[in-house]
Image (cartoon, rainbow, N blue to C red):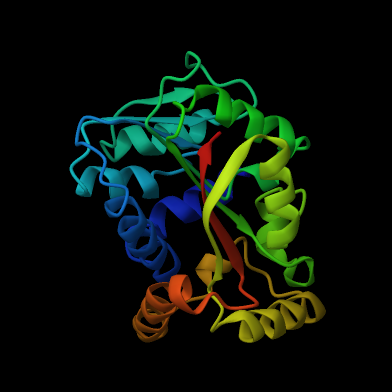
Amino acid sequence: MDAATYAAEATIEMDHWWFVGRRLLFSDIIKGLHLRPDAQILDVGTSTGTNLRLLRNLGFTRVTGVDQSPIAIRFCADKGFGQVKLGDVCALPFPDQSLDLILATDIIEHVEDDLAALRELRRVLKPGQPLLLTVPAFPILWGLQDQVSHHKRRYRLVQLLEKLDHAKLSPQQRFYFNYLLFFPILVARQLMRILRVPVESEGQINTRWLNRALTRLFQFDVETAPRVRPLIGVSALVVARRI
């Protein structure tokens, strides 16, 4: 991502409705995995630290982040989020079969060879242990945030599941989320494209009252999506285990 995008994210990740809702969703999933507090956990593409904040709040003590941007690592250090290494999802600085949990949330869409990235994630994961993976969904939603984040693609679940199968990762849970805002976001992105709205990140399009309303709506969304398993969503989530 661009430096301006990192700076915008660093400012909003603590209380912006999108990050708050995702942390709630990930927290529920991770709690269900029943990992020990000293489990070896990796957050890949840690950016400005939203997942590190989550893992710290859950009480995990052996968490490492990896990001390919020194700018992102500096933001994490400034927030006191612990160890973040410089590295790439296709060449992780960890031994084979060394990790109990990997979070790769909105990462592989940045990579030219996403299958190679999935195989590398499998390499460092202990047998039978989980990978929590999210990606942006549905190409029709392509917009400003995809551009400034340097995304290569958006996914449908069936496409993502095929890649996981090729990487020998077995899906245990899969669903779309952020489904309630699918059509509003689709319309908003089309209007932003037509009107050429001058913002550096979609996260900047927010107000205090809007953030409160969207936080409540997104909380309901992420609480219901695993059960409803909607046919559409702005994002897709898969929990997969190494075969």
Q: Residue at x 71, y 30 (%)?
A: 116
Q: Residue at x 63, y 67 (%)?
A: 199
Where's the C terminus, which quadrant? top right
Q: Position of residue 236 (x, y in %)?
A: 59, 62
- 176 relative position to 151: left or right: left
Q: Residue at x 78, y 37 (%)?
A: 112
Q: Position of residue 134 (x, y in %)?
A: 55, 53
Residue at the top extreme of this rendering: 95
Where's the N terminus, which quadrant? top right
- 170 relative position to 78: left or right: right
Does residue 70 show up?
yes
* Picture quadrant of residue 69: top right
187 to 97, vertically: above or below: below
The one nearer the camera, 187 or 107, is 107
- 124 relative position to 129: left or right: right
73 to 53, vertically: above or below: above
Number of callouts: 0
Q: Residue at x 44, y 23 (%)?
A: 85
* Picture quadrant of residue 155: bottom right
Q: Position of residue 229 (x, y in %)?
A: 54, 74
The one nearer the camera, 175 or 114, is 175
Does residue 110 show up?
no
The one nearer the camera, 231 or 45, is 231
93 to 203, vertically: above or below: above
Q: Position of residue 221 (x, y in %)?
A: 44, 78
